[in-house]
Every structure is written in C-alpha cells, then in structure tokens.
C-alpha cells in the first residue's frame, strides 16, 4: 500500500514545525550557535519537502479530475 503525498506533506510539515520549536528553545543567549542553526536548516528542508509534496498532490488530483471528465 502506498502512502499519499498529502499525508506525507502533513507529516513533513509537522516535523518542520517541531524542529522550528526545538530550535527556538535551543537558542539561549544568541541564535548564532551550531545547534540552533542545524535545527533551523533541518526545519527548512522539511517544510520545503512538504510544499513540494503538496504541489505533487495537487497535480495528481488535477490529472485524475481531467481523466474522469473525458
């Protein structure tokens, strides 16, 4: 059984939000420490993947709708 891109998008977006929260908590006196930057980079990648998966879901949905109309 294959997972849908929409489910994976929500999963990656949730992980991105979680990593952003952890990065905000890890920022003590300054944001410019290695831990905070690494967590922020991981969060950015997770949110970017979520956006790409959501766009993939929209393209698949539009393709399915076009095939049903024919």
Image: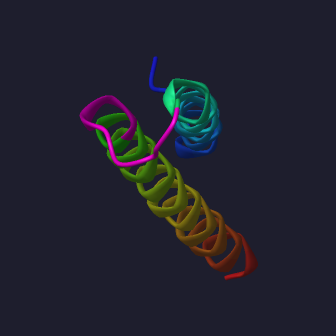
Residue situated furthest top in the rendering: 1
Is residue 40 depicted above or below 53 in this figure? above
Q: How is the image coloured?
A: rainbow
Residue drawn at x 46%, y 17% is 1
Residue drawn at x 45%, y 46% is 31
Q: Position of residue 4 (x, y in %)?
A: 55, 37
Which quarter of the figure is the C terminus placed in? Answer: bottom right
Compare residues 69 and 22 and report the one nearer the observer. 22
Lateral position of residue 14 relative to residue 55, left or right: right
Residue situated furthest front in the rendering: 29
Q: Position of residue 23 (x, y in %)?
A: 51, 33
Q: Quadrant of residue 69?
A: bottom right
Residue drawn at x 65%, y 64% is 61
Compare residues 58 and 8 and report the one nearer the observer. 8
Q: Quadrant of residue 67?
A: bottom right
- Please identify the dominant SS of the magenta region: loop
Residues drawn in magenta: 29-36
Q: Position of residue 22 (x, y in %)?
A: 56, 25
Compare residues 43 and 64 and report the one nearer the observer. 43
Q: Is residue 68 magenta?
A: no
Is residue 39 depicted above or below 54 in this figure? above
Lateral position of residue 51 relative to residue 49, left or right: right
Is residue 54 depicted above or below 12 in this figure? below
Q: Position of residue 43 (x, y in %)?
A: 45, 42
């Amino acid at each position: 059984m294959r997972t849908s891109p929409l489910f994976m998008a929500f999963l990656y977006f949730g992980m991105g939000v979680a990593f952003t929260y952890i990065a905000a908590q890890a920022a003590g006196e300054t944001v410019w420490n290695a831990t905070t930057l690494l967590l922020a980079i991981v969060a950015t990648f997770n949110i970017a993947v979520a956006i790409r998966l959501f766009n993939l879901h929209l393209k698949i949905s539009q393709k399915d709708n076009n095939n049903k109309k024919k």
